[in-house]
Amino acid sequence: MKAINEGLAREQNFLLRLAAIDTTGLTDQEKISRELLLRSFAQDQEAAEFKEWEMPLNQMDGIHTTYPQLAAQLSLPR
């Protein structure tokens, strides 16, 4: 639990620092990347209230999806 709280605190710090960046000199792609990262950080912060790390299995993630994907992730490209 301590590691999770520390990770959320780090992510909150990144979120605040990223939100403070002036986008004036950024390219369109950099602005989009910034917005997507901000959204990801914000969603992680909001989702923390549900403590999904205490849920070892759900329909989208768990041992039933990890092992089948492992073979593809470890395969060498041809």
Image (cartoon, grey):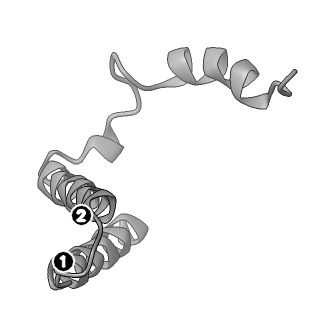
Residue pictured at 42% horizontal, 69% vertical: 3
Neighbourhood count class around disc 2 (C-alpha, 10 Å): few under 14, some 14–19, many 20 upward: some
Helix, strand or loop for disc 1: loop
Image coordinates of residue 2 in percent, x first then y, are: 37, 72
Question: The N terminus lies in which quarter of the figure?
Answer: bottom left
Residue pictured at 29% horizontal, 78% vertical: 14
Which residue position holds label 1? 23
Residue pictured at 27% horizontal, 42% vertical: 52
Question: The C terminus lies in which quarter of the figure?
Answer: top right
Lower sequence index among marks 2 and 1? 1
Q: Is residue 75 above or below residue 3?
A: above
Q: Is residue 72 above or below residue 42?
A: above
- Identify residue type, mark 1: Thr
Which residue position holds label 2? 31
- Identify residue type, mark 2: Lys
Helix, strand or loop for disc 2: helix
**Do labels 2 and 1 touch, CB within 8 Å?**
yes
